[in-house]
């Protein structure tokens, strides 16, 4: 098998030989200061790095250079994403699953987990509970089960979610995280108006992938790895990739992840919309220490920084799998989206207490959405509930253009402030509202165009008078 980033065959664009060579090359050059300086100089142009270049940075352990990597990641994040953090929540539809994934509690052989699939009425109740917190953006999740969770069920759920209008609430963007499927099904998801299609690779190492997925349709590495190409062929412009860190060694996964991004860019002219960086967590029937590839928090942050530098225009997502402490550190280094107040169990949002029996993984950050919003603002970030881009047709390369042209500050920044205002009025505690109003006032001044500032002020007044859903 030869390496070819433009190939449509999984084993050619995620080529084992190329990854092993890259990891070796990075190890051999990790103290080559001249090379590292050259790579950092290229990175400062904000046009990205190849998987090899980024792997050298990841391997580098020279203290001074590592600090430069962190500083640059922070700078790039500020340039492209400002101080905004987009908020979302996962919504678990069904934990029926026919796969045998060794790290996931939903695996078929797990007999002591109650199986549950939400009815449309239950979904409506979950959505109302999520709207009452202030959420506008969801990521729906389901196990793979052609009988219990066919595509028609997923499509019906999406229709239900978009249809619920409760008080001032609305879910304006539904991202979808379901198993790899066919081009026809991706077309149906596109027609249903989804935002991003998300699928984690879990591990890019084919041998290990097959061991970790011993049974079920997910066992097929090539079908899974080529899913994003089918999704794009089906007309989905925004796709989100990720690995489940801890399953294999991180150097291998890091190179694979960037090669996947390079492949999508080379073939479809646009790279992934987002990269997620989940880590394996303890769960029912799952002991993460069994995988023995766990990462230190420090290395985890370094991975995030190197991703930020390597793909400056790609959003980065962190979930409540991580503690508030890790999230605080990693947000600075390049994360652009976080989940808040998540419940990873089927039907979890309607329960008073967070239920554990159908949970997919332990949540490490269990603060309420109001607490997360408050914390973000106290740390200097603008919590954003914006969903404008895809609703305005700014998907795929059109979104990337906006990002590259620097116009994001005239568009995403005002949208963040206007959606924050909605949150403050409809859902926030007194303390959060007070901090938020002061933040909005200050941040209006950071909108570059005066004309836009003026429009934002007018719209904020209209929002205070009861109007909703303004966007640029
Ligand atoms: N069933 C779909 C699939 O197979 O791609 C997607 C939904 S699954 C509910 C979402 C993701 O949760 C998986 O892709 C996996 O990376 C992650 N996951 C599974 N078990 C986990 C665990 N023990 N800790 C952390 N994340 C886990």
Image (spheres, helix red, strand yellow):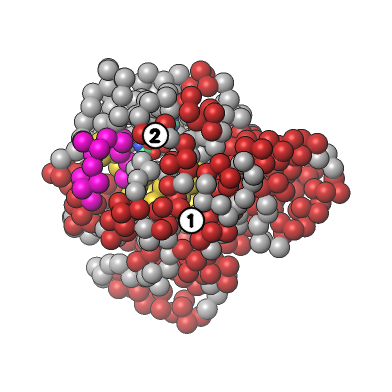
| Residue 428 at least partly seen | no
Question: Any mark on residue 273, and which?
Answer: 1
Q: Give the quadrant of the N terminus.
A: top right
The residue sitting at 77% across, 57% down in the picture is: 41
Where's residue 399, x and y in %? 48, 66
Q: Where is residue 188? Give x, y as percent.
A: 28, 56
Q: Quadrant of residue 184?
A: bottom left
- In the displayed structure image, the side of residue 16 where residue 183 appears, left or right: left
Q: What is the number of callouts on the image?
A: 2
Front label number (2 vs 1): 2
- Against 68, residue 103 (above or below) is above
Q: Which residues are magenta?
A: 140-155
Q: Nearer the viewer, residue 122 or 458?
A: 122
Q: Is mark 1 within 8 Å of ligand 1?
A: no
Residue 314 location in percent, x, y?
A: 54, 55
**SS for tag 2?**
helix
Label 2 residue near ligand 1, CB within 8 Å: yes
Label 1: which secondary element? loop
* Residue name at image x 59 percent, y 37 percent: 253
* Label 2 to label 1: alpha-carbon separation: 23 Å
- Quadrant containing ligand 1: top left
**Residue 51 drawn in magenta:** no
Circle 2 residue? 218
């Amino acid at each position: 098998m030869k390496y070819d980033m433009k190939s449509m065959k999984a084993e050619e664009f995620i080529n084992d030989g190329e990854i092993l060579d890259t990891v070796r090359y990075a190890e051999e050059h990790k103290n080559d200061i001249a090379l590292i300086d050259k790579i950092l100089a290229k990175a400062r142009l904000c046009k990205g790095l190849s998987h090899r270049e980024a792997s050298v940075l990841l391997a580098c352990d020279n203290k001074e250079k590592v600090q430069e990597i962190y500083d640059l990641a922070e700078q790039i994040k500020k340039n492209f994403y400002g101080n905004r953090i987009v908020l979302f929540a996962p919504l678990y539809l069904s934990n029926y699953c026919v796969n045998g994934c060794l790290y996931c509690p939903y695996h078929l052989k797990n007999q002591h987990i109650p199986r549950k699939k939400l009815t449309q009425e239950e979904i409506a109740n979950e959505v109302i509970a999520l709207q009452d917190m202030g959420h506008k953006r969801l990521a729906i999740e389901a196990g793979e089960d052609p009988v219990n969770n066919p595509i028609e069920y997923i499509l019906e759920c999406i229709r239900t979610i978009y249809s619920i209008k409760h008080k001032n609430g609305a879910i304006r963007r539904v991202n979808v995280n379901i198993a790899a499927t066919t081009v026809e099904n991706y077309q149906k998801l596109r027609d249903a108006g989804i935002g991003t299609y998300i699928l984690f690779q879990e591990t890019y190492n084919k041998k290990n992938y097959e061991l970790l997925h011993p049974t079920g349709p997910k066992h097929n590495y090539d079908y899974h790895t080529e899913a994003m190409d089918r999704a794009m062929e089906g007309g989905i412009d925004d796709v989100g990739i990720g690995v489940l860190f801890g399953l294999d060694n991180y150097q291998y996964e890091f190179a694979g992840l960037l090669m996947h991004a390079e492949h999508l860019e080379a073939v479809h002219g646009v790279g992934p919309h987002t990269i997620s960086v989940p880590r394996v967590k303890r769960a029912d029937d799952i002991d993460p220490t069994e995988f023995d590839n766990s990462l230190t928090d420090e290395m985890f942050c370094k991975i995030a920084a190197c991703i930020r530098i390597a793909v400056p225009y790609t959003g980065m997502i962190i979930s409540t799998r991580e503690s508030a402490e890790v999230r605080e550190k990693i947000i600075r280094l390049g994360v652009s989206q976080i989940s808040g107040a998540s419940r990873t169990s089927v039907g979890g949002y309607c329960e008073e207490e967070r239920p554990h029996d159908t949970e997919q993984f332990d949540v490490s950050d269990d603060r309420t959405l109001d607490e997360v919003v408050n914390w973000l603002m106290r740390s200097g970030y603008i919590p954003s509930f914006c969903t404008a881009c895809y609703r305005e047709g700014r998907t795929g390369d059109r979104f990337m253009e906006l990002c590259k042209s620097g116009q994001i500050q005239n568009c995403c920044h005002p949208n963040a402030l206007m959606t924050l205002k909605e949150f403050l009025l409809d859902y926030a505690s007194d303390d959060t509202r007070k901090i938020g109003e002061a933040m909005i006032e200050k941040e209006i001044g950071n909108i570059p165009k005066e004309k836009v500032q003026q429009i934002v002020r007018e719209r904020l007044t209209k929002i205070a008078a009861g109007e909703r859903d303004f966007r640029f």
